[in-house]
Amino acid sequence: MSGSENHQGINANHCFFIGSFSDSGKRTKAILKKAGFSCITVDATTTGSSLKVLEKLVTKKAEDGDNLLISLPEEKISDISSAEKYHTKLIRLAGFIIGRYSSKYRFYIEGGRTASDICRSMGWNSLEVLSSSDTGTAGLSPDNEGIEILIKPGSYNWPDSVFSGLRKQQN
């Protein structure tokens, strides 16, 4: 399976959700920014109407065919209450994107809790294993939904092969 095809063989763009403050998350963000991904950062002020603003921004970027990087801010959040707010907003935005653009994107989720919470928020109770590797990544698909997600914990890097098929955006 190439980096630009999903498990049905349909060309897809890439959408990464980074729910980790780890060095791996920082490395992933740097690689994706260099590859020309549109970067959208969820912060503590992203509530109500500002979440709608992010949804509109995502809609425009998706309609333009951009690859997406949706992430938490660079700096680690030490206050647990604030960290939960950031995380919740990331999950809500991920639900919007997956719900609206599942046929357009191949999804990558970094952070075990982030992956679990996104799957739960989408109502996915059962996932089919499409692939797995000794690097700790797993390609999964919710039953009968035609969606492909690749997940990994936030504590270590994506294998370099994940980035080999990414194209630089022509903006």
Image (cartoon, rainbow, N blue to C red):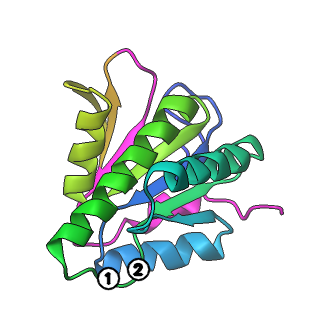
Residue at 38% from the left image edge and 55% from the top image edge = 90
The circle drawn on residue 43 is none
Q: Work out which residue is located at the far top of the displayed protein and give it.
A: 144
User: x, y (%) of residue 160?
Assistant: 44, 68
Label 2 secondary element: helix
User: x, y (%) of residue 40?
Assistant: 56, 63
Q: Is residue 119 above or below residue 110?
A: above
Residue at 26% from the left image edge and 27% from the top image edge = 124
Q: Quadrant of residue 9?
A: top right
Q: Kindly check if marks 1 and 2 are in contact, taking CB atoms under 8 A apart as contact.
A: yes
Calculate the distance from the C-alpha at mark 1 to the C-alpha at mark 2: 5 Å
Please indicate, yes or no, whether residue 136 appears anywhere in the rendered image.
Answer: no
Identify which amino acid the numbered label 2 is placed on.
Answer: Lys
User: x, y (%) of residue 118?
Assistant: 30, 43
Q: Is residue 42 above or below residue 16?
A: below
Identify which amino acid the numbered label 1 is placed on.
Answer: Asp
Q: Which residues are magenta?
A: 144-171
Q: Pointer 1: what residue?
A: 23
Q: Is residue 112 above or below residue 5?
A: below
Q: Pointer 2: what residue?
A: 26
The reply, left or right, for residue 68 in relation to residue 48 is right
Decide which of 131, 116 is in the foreground and name it.
116
User: x, y (%) of residue 150?
Assistant: 37, 47
Q: Quadrant of residue 17?
A: bottom left
